[in-house]
Image (spheres, rainbow, N blue to C red):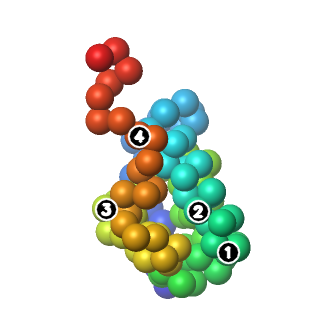
């Protein structure tokens, strides 16, 4: 298992949890994990993503890499990684 979550996640230097994209992604991940009946540790073991990275993602503190999204979707047995992006618009709030 990868113990260095900094290689798999991107912190943009903004420690605030006010980014709506990160917060929605984190909420989606948390909801899907709970629906699957998995702990962070169990999900991490099933998809080779460290538990602490899952925690950071669920709290909206990091943007995941694309390969991490795919690993998480597989670990959650989702049809598509896009399910983790539900509710995130490609349009800006100003549009």
> Could one spot residue 61 in this view of the protein?
no
> Could one spot residue 87 in this view of the protein?
yes
In terms of secondary structure, where does tag 3 sit?
helix
Indicate which disc, 4 or 3, sits on the residue closer to the N terminus. 3
Dot 1, how many residues are within 10 Å of its Cα: few (below 14), some (14-19), or many (20+)?
Answer: some
Q: For marks 4 and 3, give the one nearer the viewer.
A: 4
Q: Are marks 3 and 1 in contact (CB under 8 Å)?
A: no
Kindly report the distance in space between the C-alpha atoms of the residues bearing marks 4 and 1.
24 Å
Residue at image mark 1: 38
Residue lying furthest front: 79
Give whichever of 81, 56 is nearer the camera: 81
Q: Are marks 2 and 4 in contact (CB under 8 Å)?
A: no
Left/right of residue 42 with respect to residue 20 in the rendered view: right
In terms of secondary structure, where does tag 1 sit?
loop
In terms of secondary structure, where does tag 4 sit?
loop
Q: Position of residue 71 (x, y in %)?
A: 41, 74
Residue at image mark 2: 32
Residue at image mark 4: 88
Kindly report the distance in space between the C-alpha atoms of the residues bearing marks 3 and 1.
22 Å
Indicate which disc, 3 or 2, sits on the residue closer to the N terminus. 2
Residue at image mark 3: 66
Q: Where is residue 83 in the image (x, y as percent from the top left)?
A: 43, 58
Dot 4, how many residues are within 10 Å of its Cα: few (below 14), some (14-19), or many (20+)?
Answer: some
Measuring 40% from the left and 70% from the top, which residue is drawn there?
79
Indicate which disc, 4 or 1, sits on the residue closer to the N terminus. 1
């Amino acid at each position: 298992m990868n113990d260095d979550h900094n290689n798999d996640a991107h912190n943009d230097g903004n420690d605030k949890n006010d980014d709506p994209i990160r917060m929605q992604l984190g909420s989606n991940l948390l909801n899907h994990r709970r629906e699957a009946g998995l702990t962070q540790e169990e999900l991490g073991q099933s998809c080779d993503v460290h538990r602490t990275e899952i925690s950071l993602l669920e709290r909206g503190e990091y943007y995941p890499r694309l390969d991490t999204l795919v690993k998480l979707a597989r670990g959650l047995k989702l049809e598509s990684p896009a399910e983790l992006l539900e509710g995130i618009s490609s349009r800006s709030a100003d549009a």
